[in-house]
Image (spheres, rainbow, N blue to C red):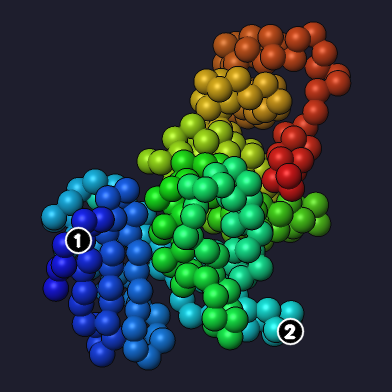
Amino acid sequence: MRRSTGDGDTFCARLGGHLLTLSSHTHGIVCARVSGGGSHLTTGELQQQFREMKNSDTRPKLLFHVSDAQRDGRRAGCAHVEVALLSTGTFSPRHVTVGRSYADFSRFHRRLKTEFGEELEGVEPPGPRLCGRGLAPQEYLSRAFAVCGHSPLFAQFLTERERAGAAALMRAGRYADALEHLGSVLAVHEKLLPWQRQTSTTAAVPALAAAAVCHRDLGRPREALAAARRALPPVRRYGMRRYRAPLLRLLVDWEHGAGRPAARLQEELTAAEDGRPASARSLKEVALEDLAD
């Protein structure tokens, strides 16, 4: 069933005894809500609904699907929700899920209020159900994103835990585990790219650089090269000088090790080091500093 309003469309469907409501807003945001039973939708079920929506509107949209709150046994009394991001319009079946607590939502909202003030009037952060305050998490994210989805604060909220976790794991030498966290970070930036093109592109550089380091130290030179090559264009384009020499050094070392000419890269590296190669920081040092920021 489809219902049109002044703000967009609402799509309703029954899935195995559960009611799925997809609200499509004029700002290109989609809010998903599941009623009845509290079970999770499968990716296939979500995909079917998105295909129907795509047929009627091909503009990119971002869907926030939030599961019911779970109690974190490691932190008594701390309720967490799982936030899944799926994009429509330019449809991709890949989705990313991150876990956030109600306290995380509250801190995020305070940051948004500092930057956007009255623009967020009537948009209150979600709280545990027993508190009886605020919007449901998925409605809050949808409404807040409609106002300030272009802000870097959104990407920070959806990646900060994963970035910090990756940095800690890298310091402990657990590179394979760190790559799992970095994969989530990069997937979030990919989802946000239509709304935060420069922000998401530059914000992904620390994760790409860290992934290059992890793959290199795990003995995966091809994967390290691929990550470094993805990071270098935005570094050049947006003048991210801290990353230029470390990335070029990794690429030059790879080309030399593979017995291939690297004269152009070497020339660019010499210019980037500005005559001070001995004092240059490593790619790992620069990436860790920004991941933990």
In the rendered image of this protein, does residue 48 appear above or below residue 91?
Answer: below
Distance (Cα) linking label 1 and label 2: 42 Å
Counting from the top left corner in percent of width and height, residue 139 is at 42, 66
Q: Nearer the viewer, residue 185 or 230?
A: 185
Amino acid on which the number 1 mark rests in the picture: Thr
Residue at 74% from the left image edge and 79% from the top image edge: 75
In the image, taking residue 34 as reference, residue 258 lies left or right, namely: right
Quadrant location of residue 42?
Answer: bottom left
Residue type at numbered disc 2: Ala
Look at the picture and state if 104 lies above or below 205. Answer: below
Which of 270/14 is in front?
14
Q: Report if the CB atoms under discs 1 and 2 are less than 8 Å apart.
A: no
Check disc 2 and report its element: helix, strand or loop. Answer: loop
Residue 6 seen in render:
yes
Instruction: Give how far across and how far down residue 198 sits, in percent.
Output: 49, 32
Q: Is residue 150 left or right of residue 278?
A: left
Residue linked to disc 2? 76
* Image disc number at residue 293: none
First in sequence, mark 1 or 2: give its number. 1
**Image disc number at residue 5:** 1
Say which of 171 and 258 sits in front.
Answer: 171
